[in-house]
Amino acid sequence: MLVLLGIGVVVLGFVLRANPLLVVMAAALTTGLAAAWTPEADFQIIYQAALTTLAAFGKAFNDNRYVSMVWFVLLAIGLLERAGLQERARMLIANVQAATVGRVLWVYFLIRQSASALGLTSLGGHPQMVRPLVAPMAEGAAEAKFGPLPDRERYLIRSHAAAADNIGLFFGEDIFIAIASILLIKSILEQNGIIVEPLQLSIWAIPTAIAALLIHSLRLWLLDAHLKRKLQAPKKAEAAR
């Protein structure tokens, strides 16, 4: 029962709002040491248990070291933003007269859904595309037409930028035959006695993707209409004064 002390360490750590990584490591060490402890255990046995637990940490890190590669991507994005990536994106789209928030997001939605249908699901995403590029470009298109944005409309634009990425990926990836979602659907149907081929699932995902494209295009058109109604009237009133 002593090995359950690790659970107590986790609960105590989260109650104290300690660093989650340190809490998990402390819980693992506690569990490893508790598993080796007996009334007859001496210092050498406890020391060996500690080394074994640390060796398990090292092996897990070495076997899964590719996971840490994502931090290099985040560092690169952070450096680009520090160098003015978002400002450049705003300036670029502000020079396009025909650009509106809805049109910018529609183009990204179309690219995201088309790329996902070809299996390129990594070509996009919130940290690498929406935050540093898509959302600032959409905000820049609005600022070029309506001036400084109120916080409510700014956050509305950002939420629609995130939605364009989510919906484009969700309804586009099922068209690609070799995707995890297709295999998951196939396995669940087979468990219930329904035998289908992945190609059939992929083909029947196309009408859903087209419907998603049409519905989201309407939502983006309504977004443009909403921003025009909310932001253009105050601008005209200020110009009249």
Image (spheres, rainbow, N blue to C red):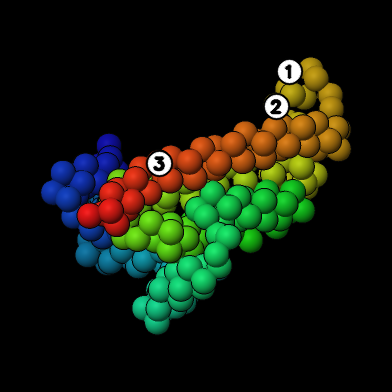
Front position among marks 3 and 2: 3
Amino acid type shown at disc 3: Arg
Mark toward the viewer: 1 or 3: 3
Q: Are marks 3 and 2 in contact (CB under 8 Å)?
A: no
Disc sitting over residue 188 in the figure: 2
| 89 to 1, vertically: above or below | below
Q: Residue at x 84, y 27 (%)?
A: 196
Indicate left or right for 26 with 185 as reference.
Answer: left
Q: Residue at x 63, y 61 (%)?
A: 123
Residue at label 1?
192
Residue 29 at least partly seen: no
Please tell me which of labels 3 and 2 falls first in the chain.
2
Q: Residue at x 22, y 65 (%)?
A: 43
Which residue is more in the foreground, 223 or 53? 223
Residue positioned 41% across, 51% down in the render: 158
10 Å crowding of disc 3: few (<14), some (14-19), many (20+): few
Residue 231: percent from left, percent from top = 35, 48
- Percent x, y for residue 52? 39, 63
Relative height, residue 27 to residue 170 (above, below): below
Residue linked to disc 3: 229
Number of numbered discs overlaid on the protein picture? 3
Specify whether residue 230 is in view.
yes
Residue 96, quarter of picture: bottom right
Asked if residue 202 lies left or right of residue 169, the reply is right
Q: Give the residue type that dot 1 points to.
A: Asn
Could you tell me which quadrant the N terminus lies in? top left
Depth check, front residue: 157 or 16: 157
Amino acid at the residue labelled 2: Ile
Sequence-wise, the earlier of marks 1 and 3 is 1
Please name whichever residue, 21 or 8, is drawn nearer the observer in this view of the structure: 21
